[in-house]
Amino acid sequence: MTRPSSTIGKLALAAEALLALAAARFVLHRTKPADVQQRNHEAAAAGGLSPGGAHAGRQGAEVAWAITWMSRRLPWRADCLVQALAGQKMLIRRRIASEIRVGTAKHDDGSFEAHAWLVCGPQVLLGGDIDRFEPLLDASDPAPRAD
């Protein structure tokens, strides 16, 4: 992960991450799977920069650093979906397309584990090692209709 080079840049990014994480934690209580899918479509539409471009890649890495760094210092839990929601919000502000993916992994004892991660182009920005998870939400699915 890339962090900003200046102290002021780090503080500004950390403050933005704090606000984004707090907002995401609040929003999480009202979030349904269809809402995540709708956010993905909005994030793709808002993306003015190519997710594979050097500028977008650097900014994506800085956002990932800030979310990860700030998540470890919060007095509340900032689990994977909270981090993904916050990171996506920060990327939308930068006009960088991203996608939240949600998946599950089945364990040998029959139990399963759910996980969310944030991708920007081919790169996983937030969510760590996702190899064992099978995605449940696919960005190629049509956006849910507003009833």
Image (tube, rainbow, N blue to C red):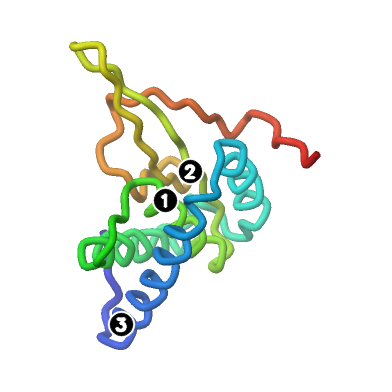
Q: Nearer the viewer, residue 56 or 69?
A: 69
Question: Is the N terminus in the top left, top right, bottom left or bottom right quadrant?
Answer: bottom left
**Mark 3 or mark 2, earlier in chain:** 3
Name the residue at 30% across, 82% down. 11
Residue 71, compared with residue 132, is above or below; it is below
Q: Amino acid at mark 1?
A: Ala
Q: CA distance from mark 3 to mark 1?
A: 20 Å
Element under disc 2: strand
Q: Nearer the viewer, residue 9 or 136?
A: 136
At label 1, counting other C-alpha atoms closer than 10 Å, the crowd grade (few under 14, some 14-19, many 20 or more) is many
Q: Which residue is mark 3?
A: 11
Question: Is the C terminus in the top left, top right, bottom left or bottom right quadrant?
Answer: top right
**Residue farthest front in this picture:** 29
- Label drawn at residue 84: 1
Whether the residues at callouts 2 and 1 have beta carbons within 8 Å, the answer is yes
Element under disc 3: helix
Q: Is residue 144 left or right of residue 129?
A: right
Q: Position of residue 130 (x, y in %)?
A: 30, 33
Q: Amino acid at mark 3?
A: Leu
Q: Nearer the viewer, residue 113 or 124?
A: 113
Q: Nearer the viewer, residue 113 or 52?
A: 113
Q: Position of residue 105 (x, y in %)?
A: 31, 22
Q: Is residue 22 left or right of residue 79?
A: right
Q: CA distance from mark 3 to mark 2?
A: 26 Å
Whether the residues at callouts 3 and 2 have beta carbons within 8 Å, the answer is no
Q: Which residue is mark 2?
A: 100
Q: Amino acid at mark 2?
A: Ile
